Amino acid sequence: MSTRRTFLKLTAAAGLAPAVASAQGAAAGKVVVIGGGYGGAMAARMLKALEAKLDVTLVEPNPVYTSCPFSNSVLANLREIGQQEFRYDGIRRAGVSVAQTSATAIDATARTVTLADGNRLSYDRLVLSPGIDFNWGAVQGYDEAAAQKMPHAWKAGAQTVLLRQQLQAMADGGLVVMSVSANPYRCPPGPYERASLIAYWLKIWKPKSKLLLLDAKDAFSKQRLFQNAWAQLYPGLIEWVPLSKGGKVTSVDPATLTLVTEFGSHKAAVANVIPPQRAGAIAAQAGVADRTGWCPVEPVAFESTLRPGIHVLGDAAIMGAIPKSAFAANAQAKVCAAAIVDLLAGRKPQDPILINTCYSLVAADYGISVAGVYRPDKGQLAEVPGAGGTSPLDVVGGFRGQEAVYAESWFRTVTAETFG
Amino acid sequence: MGRVLLPALASAVLAAGPAGAADVPANGPPGASSCTGCHAPSKLADSAIPRIAGRKAADIETFMREYRSGAWPSSVMGRIAKGFDDQQTQAIAAWFAAQPE
Ligand SMILES: Cc1cc2nc3c(=O)[nH]c(=O)nc-3n(C[C@H](O)[C@H](O)[C@H](O)COP(=O)(O)OP(=O)(O)OC[C@H]3O[C@@H](n4cnc5c(N)ncnc54)[C@H](O)[C@@H]3O)c2cc1C
């Protein structure tokens, strides 16, 4: 009771009269969602669709969301950045209040969120889907200023455009160097899709150029499919250097575009550094990130195991065997929304089943995929044995072309479902 | 604090009750809400992926069984269908069948 009184006082103090009214009246509870990406935007929308009486606020500073999925196609001139952009009008139309600002602090005990615009929101349940932040300095010399010379392009938008401009300005014969982080990071096959599509573009526009792929690991997602396709489509163009052959980049010099590995150094004409990552900073502030920098959750409603009442979705969470993908964030959001409606109604949420599918383009008309089915097992989300796996290695006819078409269909469907 | 709020919420939600009957949330039995990432429950966007909302439950089940056994060729559905048993598939098929075409 005392907690509730504090909660009312706080919202009143923050001048949020409507929130107080809904908390006192007969309507359902109040859910705040932080982060309007694939996880958060879908969760906000699904919560409202499942229970119109819920008071749902989405907190997101950017008026426009720029999608990472298909942003590698922008680098290869196959799409324009505008095709990656989604607004929040559809989400507002669905009855969600959108607070265009960022969350600066979360008090898990008082159940309040402080916003950069000075307001404070109270919640019965909080959903966090803040995506990633970079571990600046983990690769020595790679900080925010360095990213203006050696873009990461691992959050889509200005960085994507910068990397594309650099590629286009490069002389034919210039060396493109990519550096890839160790696991875990956002979108396991993403760097290899990027290498493929840059190679696709180089082959047409800068045929004397090469791409050096420096990797801090010895194996990667869909590896044989990628490597077979590279040998077939881009022979001699992509050189992959694994960890054991000196692939790990330990420092960079942005002034000279030099990348230093344990075995030597490489001077690039264009350098793309995909640095080590962690959950978006607000997660650590809220106390839901552990020492790894990511957020442990239980496998049914994705509630934090560190702070009750806070659900973590998408890239920020440790989701057992499920990779960090937009497909997965979207699937988790729908499961989480249904679970929150149950929890607020005093019902026990059902055990979920989740699917993940990551499509990658190796060329404009050449798609491959990896899929998995997951369910709770011993407190974790585990892969259902016998299901999932990658596209076949040997195929006939138009199989790869068909998967490229399905990839784009998925993108159109999931962005329509999420942003409307 | 949960104790104070929950009873009120519970009755409000149950009265509005989309979930009413068999404890199936409005976004479907386990797994269904992942299918919709590719198979939208309503016509949302141009897509080469076949629509399954509003199709006969028995047809959806037959497809899923044949994808699982490999009798019917597919790019991705074989890998997905193998993650669902007959009972789970049946529940999902019934839910999609009940969605508007
Ligand atoms: C090049 C590339 C290609 C990819 N391709 C694919 C693909 O083909 N398929 C696929 O499934 N996945 C792909 N991914 C992965 C996909 O982008 C992520 O997995 C997905 O975006 C995760 O969703 P999320 O909700 O966790 O985070 P995000 O989508 O990053 O959303 C996080 C949101 O939170 C907001 N935010 C952060 N902090 C705060 C705060 N304090 N207050 C308020 N808001 C905040 C941010 O502004 C952002 O809008 C790709 C990624 C990259 C980099």
Image (cartoon, coloured by chain):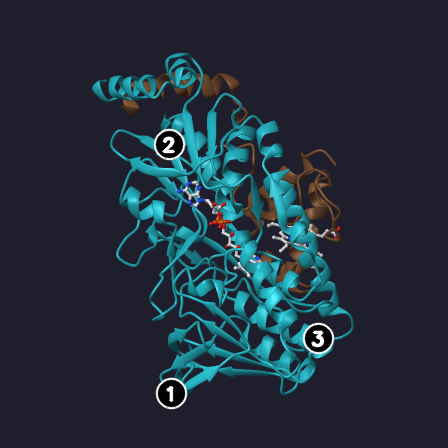
Q: Secondary structure at mark 1?
A: loop
Side of B50 where A61 appears, left or right: left
| Mark 2 and mark 3: Cα distance apart in space | 48 Å
Farthest residue in the right direction?
Answer: A397
Residue A125's tag is 2
Kindly identify which chain the residue marked by label 1 belongs to: A
- Point 61% across, 33% down: residue: A89
Neighbor class of circle 1 (other Cα within 10 Å; few <14, some 14-19, many 20+) is few
Residue B56's tag is none
Of the residues shown, which amino acid type is indicated by label 1? Phe
Kindly identify which chain the residue marked by label 3 belongs to: A
On whether ligand 1 comes within 8 Å of the CB at mark 1, the answer is no
Of the residues shown, which amino acid type is indicated by label 2? Arg
Side of A263 where A108 appears, left or right: left
* Residue A339 place in picture, x, y as percent: 44, 36
Q: Secondary structure at mark 3?
A: loop
Report the mark closest to the observer, 3 or 1.
1
Chain coloured brown in this rendering: B
Q: Earlier in the sequence, mark 2 or mark 3?
A: 2
The answer to whether dots 3 and 1 both sit on one chain is: yes
Chain coloured cyan in this rendering: A
